[in-house]
Image (cartoon, grey):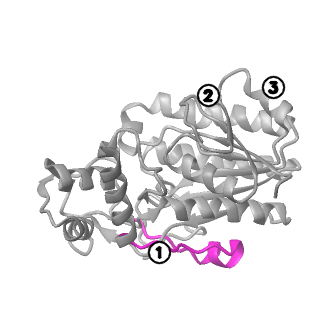
Amino acid sequence: MEDKTILVTGGSGFIGSVTCKLLVDSGFNVINLDRVKRSIEGVTQYPFDINNSQVKGLIEMTKPDAIIHLAAHHSVPKSIAEAKDYYTNNVENSIKLLNHAIDGGVKHFIFSSSSSVYGDSDNLLNSEIDECNPKTPYGRSKLMIETILKDLSAVHDFKFASLRYFCAAGSHEGFGYQLDPKEHIMPILVDNALNGGKFVVNGEDYETVDGTCVRDYTHVFDIATAHVASLHYLFDGGESDIFNIGAGSPKSIKQVITEVEAQTGNSVDVEYGPRREGDAAKTDANISKAIDTLGWEPIYSLEDIVKTEIEYQSAKKK
């Protein structure tokens, strides 16, 4: 794939940095479009946002064979209080990027969607054919772009793969979650286990195995490999489609706490609070479509996720 150029928006972020590294290792020419500067060997970076006036010219100049669009506001609870900003960034700016991509002749597009599009589901598994009923502006913004992608691909020479991520976590080869850990359970839970502090569980009255929220925690490297698999799928002539990307092994928050305590050898000081607005009781990915169509399969377990997060946080202290 040495002749293929991939433009990654948000390539300095948690998922983006691991994806950029894997793309380089897979032989792609990689361009990172992100205002946050981050040095990744083999990656060319342009430090500005997707709504910058230079994006159109950048696409025309670099002529990417595909775009992986990761840049977005991504906090579920913040999206409720900051809905205007979320729709501006996640929807309006994504539409601008799509227009530039189509006008610039980009024929392949991978979109970072989310399990949040499902909302609360009565089904045991979240499948791509399920009706979507997102509970928050974040989830609705992702579903809006999926709808727009379907409409655009129907009338343009343009194919997409929308990947619905299920709770990205863990770290890979020195790349981990760098922003406010309060938005992600794994880094703050591991930090509390290693360094002390109170861990607040939002709700213990859900209709789940133990009353706490259940999530399909998915290792960030498994998500990165799904991007590469999706590129090959599209380059080989695959049709536009939507895929769940998860581990297929959901765990409750209490189960995650137990695993963190076992691996660190420390007890976590847990406080139970009220439910958090916008949280679904359970997410559980049916990943059979991605396995059958993309030839992709997750390899990391919850134990691996916790282990790599502990290694990442321990290394940062040295």
Q: Which mark is residue 49?
A: 2
Q: CA distance from mark 3 to mark 1?
A: 41 Å
- Magenta span: predominant SS is loop
Is residue 33 toward the left or the right of residue 184 in the image? right
Asked whether 61 or 265 is in front, the reply is: 265
The label nearer to you, 1 versus 2, is 2
Amino acid under disc 2: Asp
Q: Which mark is residue 248?
A: 1
Is mark 3 in CB contact (under 8 Å) with mark 1? no
The verdict on residue 283 being magenta is yes
Residue with the most extreme front position: 318
| Residue under the point 72% across and 49% down | 149
User: What's drawn in magenta, residue-wise?
Assistant: 282-302
Amino acid under disc 1: Gly
Amino acid under disc 3: Gly
| Residue under the point 43% across and 70% down | 284
Would you say residue 131 is visible in this rendering?
no
Q: Vertically, is 162 above or below 217?
A: above
Sequence-wise, the earlier of marks 2 and 3 is 2
Residue under pointer 3 = 57
Sequence-wise, the earlier of marks 3 and 1 is 3
